[in-house]
Image: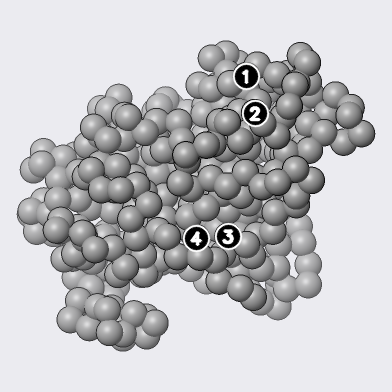
Amino acid sequence: MIKVGIVGGTGYTGVELLRLLAMHPHVEVAAITSRSEAGMKVSDMYPNLRGHYDTLAFSEPDAKQLGCLDAVFFATPHGVAHALAGELLDQGTRVIDLSADFRLRDADEWSHWYGQPHGAPALLGEAVYGLPEMHREQIKKARLVAVPGCYPTAVQLGYLPLLEAGLVDAGRLIADCKSGVTGAGRGAKVGSLLAEASESMKAYGASGHRHLPEIRQGLTDIQAGAVSLTFVPHLTPMIRGIHATLYSTLNAAPGDLQALFERRYAGEPCVDVMPAGSHPETRSVKGTNTCRIAVHRPENSDTIVVLSVIDNLVKGASGQAVQNLNLMFGFDEATGLNAPAVMP
């Protein structure tokens, strides 16, 4: 049994971590922090967790207390993990950061997209990007893991087999992506209000979104060379889910694309390649750590269309964080993550 803490436990990713870890046989949540809610019982804020965390209460962040734990999750806004991560690592605690603080390897690029200086550039060299399907062996040995964003997870997993095989033009990639409103976080924002988001859909960040450099960095690693990506996210009137429609242009004879995807993800516990001709739905992954993928070649043209769906709060955040924890501590990778999707 390992003991873990959660810094920033009042947001959607924090409560999702609590929900998933309540089912984990090898993990005890020993601390959860919130400056604004210190002293409140977790089960009072989240009645769905009654019977699971009845004695656990939010507390002020305390580096000494957190440093006694085996691992600490940061479910915080960007910039928060910079201040504490190094101190925890020095005490021997492993850090799993769900924010964007350590995803980009270039501190200057991070500063450009997040509007402030990077607070811990010395740690960037050892941070491991926590996409298990790409970096499983590095994650196992990591002290500091940067959990990928939701859009980057869906997009990278969709393009991965094609770019690895060198089948598509890396200079002509298009990612047309949709997200549920929980992707904007739990804080009160006008655009996330029911009356604003319901029965409507809109694009945002079309001229540049913070997830663009993260996706581009990952695709460049796969390609081992430069990529050009057009990424347009959209807000849709659903609570959870990411749907990524990914376009690319063939530059070589593709062979059997269905077989290519099935081979690449054979044995991957959290990726499901659907039968040929399928159109995966976001509701089919609701509450799960699964990415469902389908590949299409419309009219046998030179265009490839990949459909990739995830739950933005699970495989796109907290579930992937638990998947990383499992790898770091030698547990079966899918421990605590095997529940089927919730339907309807």
Disc 4 designates what residue?
Answer: 288
Disc 1 designates what residue?
Answer: 165
Q: Secondary structure at mark 2?
A: helix
Q: What is the spatial separation of the Cα atoms under label 4 and label 3, in whole angstroms? A: 5 Å
Q: Nearer the viewer, residue 274 or 45?
A: 274
Marks 3 & 2, CB-CB < 8 Å contact: no
- From the image, state whether disc 3 or disc 2 is nearer to you: 2
Q: What is the spatial separation of the Cα atoms under label 2 and label 4, in whole angstroms? A: 24 Å
Relative horizontal placement of residue 132, taking residue 230 as reference (left or right):
left
Disc 2 designates what residue?
Answer: 260
Relative horizontal placement of residue 4, taking residue 174 as reference (left or right):
left
Disc 3 designates what residue?
Answer: 285
Marks 2 & 1, CB-CB < 8 Å contact: yes
How far from the left and from the top, in percent, is residue 53?
A: 24, 78
Q: What is the spatial separation of the Cα atoms under label 2 and label 1, in whole angstroms? A: 9 Å
Marks 4 & 3, CB-CB < 8 Å contact: yes
Q: Quadrant of the N terminus?
A: bottom left
Residue at 73%, 38% in the rendered image? 295
Query: Which numbered disc flags the more N-terminal residue, 1 or 4?
Result: 1
Residue at 21%, 77% in the rendered image? 57
- Rendered position, 135 above or below 91: above
Query: Which numbered disc flags the more N-terminal residue, 2 or 1?
Result: 1
Amino acid type at circle 3 is Val
Q: Splitting the image into 4 quarters, where does residue 83 fall?
A: top left
- From the image, state whether disc 2 or disc 4 is nearer to you: 2
Q: What is the spatial separation of the Cα atoms under label 3 and label 1, in whole angstroms? A: 27 Å
- Rendered position, 121 above or below 288: above
How far from the left and from the top, in percent, is residue 116?
A: 41, 40
Amino acid type at circle 4 is Thr
Q: Splitting the image into 4 quarters, where does residue 238 fall?
A: bottom right
Query: Which numbered disc flags the more N-terminal residue, 2 or 4?
Result: 2
